[in-house]
Image (tube, rainbow, N blue to C red):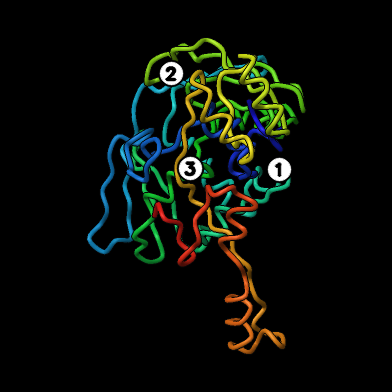
């Protein structure tokens, strides 16, 4: 089950959980990925890479034989290659790129990492090699490429839809290299994915993946209890004790990579006074919030970095 409808199916443009869960994870791959449940990097569409001695040039060697999905609007004529990587990043970087302003053109993750200024050039020494040149050394650069906004789209599909006069279809009817292809989407109702037989890591073990869009956490749990669905995210904290008592349910939990905080505008009085800010910070009863809102499932933050980092 899903907790909401995606804004669209391009994780470059929309980074909410409902959007990336329905696009980046089933439909797309990235050059590198995080090993599930960890921050450990593993090769994906890039088999290997090296960094220049000055830390400013990253060369990625791409996986060969990777197939793109198809749909009723497009059938690929070639495998994944360097052109797809260059398209996927230059769309976000170059304001004059024909796709930059399609579907709102808001690339919040790309811009928050200042990739526009960091990446000075992207080129391809050959069809299966991509080279990123940076303005300065950036230690987390490869890890940043595992973020969902760095998903790789099909340049050939984009060209075809641009010529057809329907470029926004690239973002609403996605084509990627991932394990599932989008088969049907009914807004606020369900999303149907089918296994991509030519997936480079082998066909998925399930033929159909259905997201039943159910915003209410208690309703999601009721469907789970009736076996109307098999997986649900984000349970209502109040339901956790009952879920733990149900032997038919495998309740899994892991510390999230999120930190909630109250931000002060230090440019305006009285918040320009550090003593006032300290007083407000000390006045917040964190244990009471954790108990009342999260039913004991949260932890008090020590700094802006979440515990898992």
| Image quadrant where residue 261 sits | bottom right
- Identify the element where label 3 is drawn: helix
Location of residue 285 in the rendering, given as x and y in whole percent from the top left corner: 60, 67
State which tag comes first along the sequence, 2 or 1. 1
- Closest to the observer, 271 or 172: 271
Location of residue 148 in the rendering, given as x and y in whole percent from the top left corner: 51, 42
Residue 118 falls left or right of residue 218: left
| Image quadrant where residue 222 sits | top right
State which tag comes first along the sequence, 2 or 3. 3
Tell me the residue that label 1 is attached to: 102
Location of residue 180 in the rendering, given as x and y in whole percent from the top left corner: 53, 20
Residue in the picture at 35% in, 36% down: 46
* CA–CA distance in space, label 1 to label 3: 17 Å
Location of residue 111 in the rendering, given as x and y in whole percent from the top left corner: 57, 58
For label 2, count other residues whose C-alpha is less than 10 Å away and answer few (under 14), some (14-19) or many (20+): many
Q: Quadrant of the C terminus?
A: bottom left
| Image quadrant where residue 168 sits | top right
Count of labels shown? 3
Considering only vertical position in the picture, is 146 above or below 209?
A: below
* CA–CA distance in space, label 2 to label 3: 22 Å
Tell me the residue that label 2 is attached to: 199
For label 1, count other residues whose C-alpha is less than 10 Å away and answer few (under 14), some (14-19) or many (20+): some
Considering only vertical position in the picture, is 94 above or below 13?
A: below
């Amino acid at each position: 089950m899903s907790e909401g409808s995606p804004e669209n199916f391009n994780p470059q443009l929309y980074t909410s959980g409902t959007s990336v869960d329905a696009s980046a994870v089933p439909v797309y791959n990235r050059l590198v990925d995080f090993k599930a449940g960890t921050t450990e990097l593993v090769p994906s569409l890039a088999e290997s890479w090296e960094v220049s001695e000055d830390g400013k040039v990253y060369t990625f060697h791409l996986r060969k034989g990777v197939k793109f999905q198809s749909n009723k609007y497009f059938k690929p004529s070639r495998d994944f290659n360097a052109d797809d990587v260059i398209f996927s990043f230059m769309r976000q970087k170059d304001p004059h790129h024909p796709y930059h302003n399609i579907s709102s053109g808001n690339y919040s993750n790309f811009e928050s990492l200042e990739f526009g200024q960091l990446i000075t050039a992207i080129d391809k020494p050959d069809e299966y090699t991509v080279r990123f040149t940076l303005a300065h050394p950036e230690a987390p650069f490869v890890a940043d490429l595992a973020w969902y906004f760095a998903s790789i789209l099909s340049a050939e599909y984009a060209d075809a839809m641009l010529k057809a006069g329907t470029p926004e279809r690239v973002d609403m009817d996605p084509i990627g290299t991932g394990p599932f292809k989008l088969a049907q989407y009914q807004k606020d109702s369900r999303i149907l994915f089918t296994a991509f037989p030519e997936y480079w890591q082998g066909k998925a073990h399930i033929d159909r993946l259905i997201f039943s869009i159910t915003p209410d956490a208690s309703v999601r749990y009721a469907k789970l209890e009736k076996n109307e669905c098999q997986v649900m995210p984000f349970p209502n904290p109040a339901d956790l004790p009952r879920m733990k008592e149900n032997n038919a349910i495998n309740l899994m939990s892991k510390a999230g990579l999120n930190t909630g905080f109250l931000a002060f505008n230090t440019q305006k009085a009285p918040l320009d006074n550090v003593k006032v800010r300290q007083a407000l910070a000390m006045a917040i009863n964190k244990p009471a919030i954790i108990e009342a809102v999260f039913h004991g499932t949260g932890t008090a933050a020590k700094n802006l970095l979440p515990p898992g980092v």
